Image: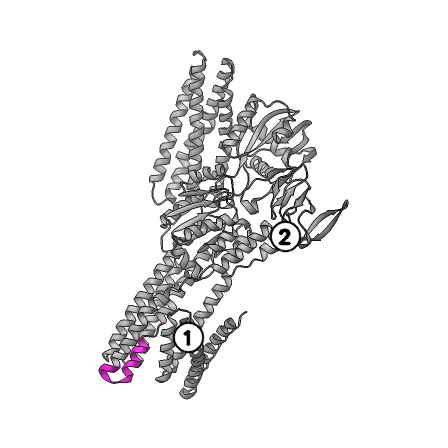
Amino acid sequence: MSFERVLRWALVAIAIAGLSAGILAWLAGRPDLAGLCWTLATAPVVAGLAFSIVRDFLAGRFGVDAIALVSMSAALALGQPLAGAVVALMYSGGNVLEDIAIARAEHDLRALVDRAPREARRRVEGRIEQVPVDAVAIGDRLLVQAGEVVPVDGVVISDAAVIDESALTGEPIPVARARGGAILSGALNAGATFEMTVTAVAGESTYAGIVKMVTAAQTAKAPFVRLADRYALVFLPVSLALAFAAWWISGDLLRSLAVLVAATPCPLILAAPVAFIAGVARAARRGILVKGGGALEALARAHTVLFDKTGTLTVGGARLLSVEVAPGETAEEVLLFGASLEQASHHVIAGAIVQAGTERGLSLKLPEQVRETMGSGLRGVIEGRRIEAGSREFVMAGGPTPEWATRAIRRASWRSALIVFVAVEGRPIGALLLADELRPDTPRAIRLLREAGIARIVMVTGDRAGAAQAIGAALDLDSVLAERVPSDKVDAVRSEQRLHPTIMVGDGINDAPALAAADVGIALGARGASASSEAADVVILADRLDRVGEAIAIAQRARRIAVQSIVAGMTLSILAMLAATFGWLQPVPAALVQEAIDVAVILNALRALSPGYRHSGRSMTAAAGRELHRNHLALIGQLDRLRSIVDALDDATPEGAAALIAEANAVVQDQVVAHERDDEGHVYPQLAKVLQESHGLSAMSRAHREILHLARLLARVAEDLPSEKVDRYLIRDAQRLIEAVETLVRLHTAQEEDIYEAVAAR
């Protein structure tokens, strides 16, 4: 702890002790001793404040502290030590509160440093030796084992390496690096052990650069000017002028004393800190940790918000997008075999596939004799059948690629998705498409930001341009900056800062420099991303992106209340000073009036503890929300089957087409129509009791009617099949209807998820 911080704590301790001792002495009938105690409580604060004001004045700063100095000095000079002691306590206590806020906002880089490898495995003359990472030189050959963090920058000299670069680039899916491919320090080996050649020493590698950038950014960030200081520039000269006028009019120093007592700057000293501390407390109740009143004020002034993509706007990992199937197979069987086999792997992709199978209610089988080829796939036996899951090269062993597989690869490319093929007894039966996806609350989060007055929303990510543009288009963002390394993110923040106050929102190590550089850095810390949390000014403890909009709304309300309190307090104080100037208030009554003003200002500032808006008195329970989500997951499985039928109709014979159309109609009538009717009859009436207005539900009901209309048309086609000639025109009409139902229901389901997310119990 610095000497200045120790001194501030000592001054507040002296003020508390002196004020308390004086009160006890006064109660004991010793007013002389009480006055001495109060004087001794005030004098050290006056001395320290005078030194601070001179130092700040020489540095070009001037603020509310000058009013405190004048009021305390005048109180002592004119025999009002109690008033001086009260102001001394308020001033010194405010400084300590500010110190606490600063201490919480200091960016602790221990998490970044702790993650960096301390040692490396170096190959020397046919043997492997462990050496300190600082001893590694350019040209050394290093061995990086599975699960280890790459210690320095280099190039791969093994046949291949599978690398998780999410901590550096934000790309959520591991990437393959062939021989000669560049590899960055800080990345994680997600595949088999590989060897690399060093191209940069530890101090000059990528990971070390990230730490340096965070340090530089936090050093360069200028503190926000205290809100009260801006008003002090007006209030101080007015106070002194009125005090002089009172003496000039009457020639009585008591009038000047009354003016100065009435001018005690408690509204300025207390209003903003109390309002902002109340705002910080309010935010904490919502799972938002704001590191001090300065950060809260900066939030309230924000114009632009920059978002990282992976783990911030999106869930930050692979999720099953769709199941592509070979002719004659079913999506359920493909996912069942794939998820059952992947239970034997600890790979991040395997976990996503297993989770998808579990969520869709599949009863996974126990795999046996599993062999995993790191970075390529798995082989095993399930219920006596040989199953394979992995890349196209792994599953098809260099053989011809079926037409359906080519189509699946093309769809994966369009959606920037990873594809995992599944084969039974050497025959590919389908493929699983996985990619990062939007968080459920992301659309609501963007809407809340727009409602809070944020004029510009930008996504800046290390992910590929295709994946980034898709997310940006879905959210209607103002700009998308893709393939940005951490230094590029800092540049983007600096560029926006030159125009307007800027917020950066992220969650990964690669976001830490940008979070530190922004006017306000907001980290999603629910998943333990400690590096970004420590570099940020605000940490969202709950795993909800919509808390960002709430944080801004809370900050705006706290700032609005602070300004109201300051203006009201100054106005009332000026009125009291005018009354004292004309002799209508003597010093003691003036002090009582000022105390009443102080209490009123504080009570008003404490309104920032309340939400300031009224929720509907009811909300959907978390259990009800989970049940609705499970129903949607079950429905999505049926939609995957409809998509498979649409694809299969391309090459189906007339007899096969008739069977597929009939199957699609059965799925639509038995599953889709039943689900939509249940929503309309049971779910929406419940939602209507929760929502404050029903216009949104009316629009959703319109989608129900359109889905039911398409279902009736498909039923007509299916009913006419025995008497109609099944030609290519009929097949095309059926395809269009099935695809329209599938697409509309997917969109409608996503919209319902947004509504459930918004009304679920928080």
668 displayed left or right of 320: left
Q: Residue 704 carries which label?
A: none
Q: In which quarter of the image is residue 111?
A: bottom right
Q: Which residue is drawn at 43% across and 61% down?
A: 294
Q: Using the image as rendered, state which of residue 630 and residue 220 is in the foreground.
A: 220
Q: Examine the structure image and report whether residue 487 is included in the region drawn in magenta.
A: no
Task: Report the residue that reaches farthest toward the right.
Answer: 126
In percent of width and height, residue 334 lies at: 58, 28
- Magenta span: predominant SS is helix
Q: Using the image as rendered, state which of residue 691 and residue 404 is in the foreground.
A: 404
Quarter of the image with the N terminus is bottom right
Quickly name the residue at label 2.
Answer: 202
Please say whether residue 508 is visible from this viewpoint.
Answer: no
271 displayed left or right of 325: left
Depicted 92 relative to depicted 384: above or below: below
Quickly name the residue at label 1.
Answer: 54
Q: Quadrant of residue 112?
A: bottom right
Q: Examine the structure image and report whether residue 264 is included in the region drawn in magenta.
A: yes
213 displayed left or right of 340: left
Could you say whether the residue bearing mark 1 is in a helix, strand or loop? helix
In percent of width and height, residue 666 lies at: 47, 23
Is the residue marked by circle 1 packed among few (<14), some (14-19), or many (20+) residues within 10 Å?
A: some
In percent of width and height, residue 38 lies at: 42, 82
Q: How many labels does the image show?
A: 2
In percent of width and height, residue 199 lies at: 63, 47
Q: How far apart are marks 1 and 2 (CA)?
A: 46 Å
Depicted 520 relative to depicted 24: above or below: above
Depicted 5 relative to depicted 712: above or below: below
- Please state the extent of the stretch shown in magenta in the rendering: 247-265
